[in-house]
């Protein structure tokens, strides 16, 4: 007697059905190019007047130096004479002087003097990156011209108390993967224990050409009320401003790009000046470090391959598309290697 009461078995899935059908997101350095964004290289306090520091950047090397006039510059590290590393040179006035034969380069990276007195060759220059010094951090843009500007805090800086922090040991993934945490509302709940007081605010996300912002009304660990506006600029800049436990707080985090597959973290916390400022800054610094430490075990081991997203991933999905189409280039390639 045949048994017709059972539902037909699901057809066996062929290996082909397990193929990833989504378009991958290009890794930093893939095909020799990197996202065109503002990347942090150093804290301002790490580069006092007359100092020079070397930094890995975009799989190459740059120097960050500050002239005696206080201006900071980011230029390719290798001298166009015969290639000495300028990070072992020194700052003379507003120029960086190479340690090998004492050629000097001004803040624009142009050779203005040779050690022996020969006229500087007309094309002897370094690659000069667009630079901004903001939030106590020195930022360089991967490009000849910035595609966008870093935002300002909505409170004038002279009313703020600001303190910096950094994680210079590189995390083991591209910085845009950290940026993708911001529109990943599910991870905010699971990893950071943030409970929204409303439905997920996907429809409130303000999408822009080079980033997005949205506001959440939520409760943090310990039952702390928070109403924050947060967002990403480019591929490497996170910020969040709003009220935490009733007091105003602003946070910026930048993801540095020493080489593909890694990122460093430079950040700041800001609170309103006043009698409670120091206590609030301590809380803010503890929260920032705790939050990064909650993410680190995941970020250091992830193989970020978006596959099956659901309705709850709506904003994340849109951000991943933004990243897929994001401008990438590497105009300093010939100078920083
Ligand atoms: S290598 Fe820099 S001056 Fe010669
Ligand atoms: Fe996170």
Image (cartoon, rainbow, N blue to C red):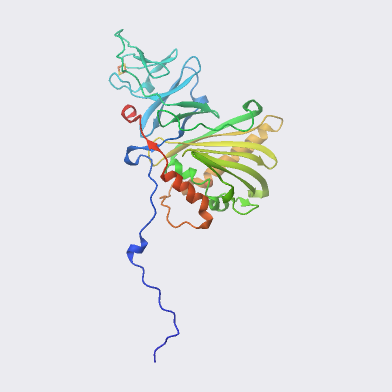
Image vertical order of residue 276 relative to residue 206, above or below: above
Q: Find residue 5 and report its image quarter.
A: bottom left
Q: Nearer the viewer, residue 85 or 178?
A: 178
Find the residue positioned furthest to the right.
275
Find the residue positioned furthest to the left.
82
Q: Report the side of 304 relative to 222 (left or right).
A: left
Q: Find residue 11 and report its image quarter.
A: bottom left
The x, y position of residue 24, in whole percent, is 38, 49
Quadrant location, ligand no. 1: top left
Quadrant of image for the C terminus: top left
Q: Report the side of 274 relative to 238 (left or right).
A: right
The x, y position of residue 205, in whole percent, is 56, 46
Q: Nearer the viewer, residue 322 or 278?
A: 322
The x, y position of residue 41, in whole percent, is 45, 30
The x, y position of residue 322, in whole percent, is 45, 45
Q: Find residue 283 and report its image quarter.
A: top right
In the rendered image, is residue 297 in sight?
Answer: no
Which residue does the image show at 34% across and 42% down from the upper left?
A: 30
Quadrant of image for the N terminus: bottom left
Q: How many marks?
A: 0
In the rendered image, is residue 316 in sight?
Answer: yes
């Amino acid at each position: 007697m045949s048994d017709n009461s059972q539902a037909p078995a699901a057809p066996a899935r062929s290996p082909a059905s397990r193929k990833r059908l989504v378009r991958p997101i290009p890794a930093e350095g893939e095909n020799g190019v990197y996202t065109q964004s503002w990347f942090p290289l150093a804290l301002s306090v790490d580069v006092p007047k007359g100092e020079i520091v070397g930094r890995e950047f975009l799989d190459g090397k740059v120097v960050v130096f500050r002239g005696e006039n206080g201006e900071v510059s980011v230029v390719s590290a290798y001298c166009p004479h015969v290639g000495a590393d300028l990070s072992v040179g020194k700052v003379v006035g507003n120029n960086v002087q190479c340690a090998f034969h004492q050629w000097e380069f001004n803040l624009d990276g142009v050779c203005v003097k040779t050690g022996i007195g020969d006229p500087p060759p007309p094309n002897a220059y370094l690659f000069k990156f667009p630079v901004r010094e903001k939030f106590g951090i020195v930022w360089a843009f991967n490009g000849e011209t910035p595609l966008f500007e870093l935002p300002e805090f909505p409170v004038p800086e002279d009313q703020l108390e600001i303190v910096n922090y950094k994680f210079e040991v590189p995390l083991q993934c591209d910085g845009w993967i950290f940026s993708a945490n911001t529109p990943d509302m599910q991870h905010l709940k699971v990893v950071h224990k943030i409970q929204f007081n409303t439905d997920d605010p996907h429809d409130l996300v303000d999408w822009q050409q080079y980033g997005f912002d949205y506001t959440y009304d939520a409760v943090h660990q310990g039952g702390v009320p928070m109403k924050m506006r947060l967002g990403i600029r480019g591929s490497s800049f996170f910020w969040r401003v709003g009220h935490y436990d009733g007091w105003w707080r602003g946070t910026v985090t930048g993801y540095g790009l020493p080489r593909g597959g890694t990122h460093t973290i430079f950040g700041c916390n800001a609170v309103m000046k006043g009698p409670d400022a120091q206590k609030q800054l301590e809380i803010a610094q503890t929260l920032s470090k705790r939050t990064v430490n909650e993410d680190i075990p995941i970020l250091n081991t992830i193989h970020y391959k978006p596959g099956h997203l659901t309705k709850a991933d709506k904003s994340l999905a849109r951000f991943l598309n933004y990243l897929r189409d994001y401008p990438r280039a590497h105009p300093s390639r010939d100078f920083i290697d």
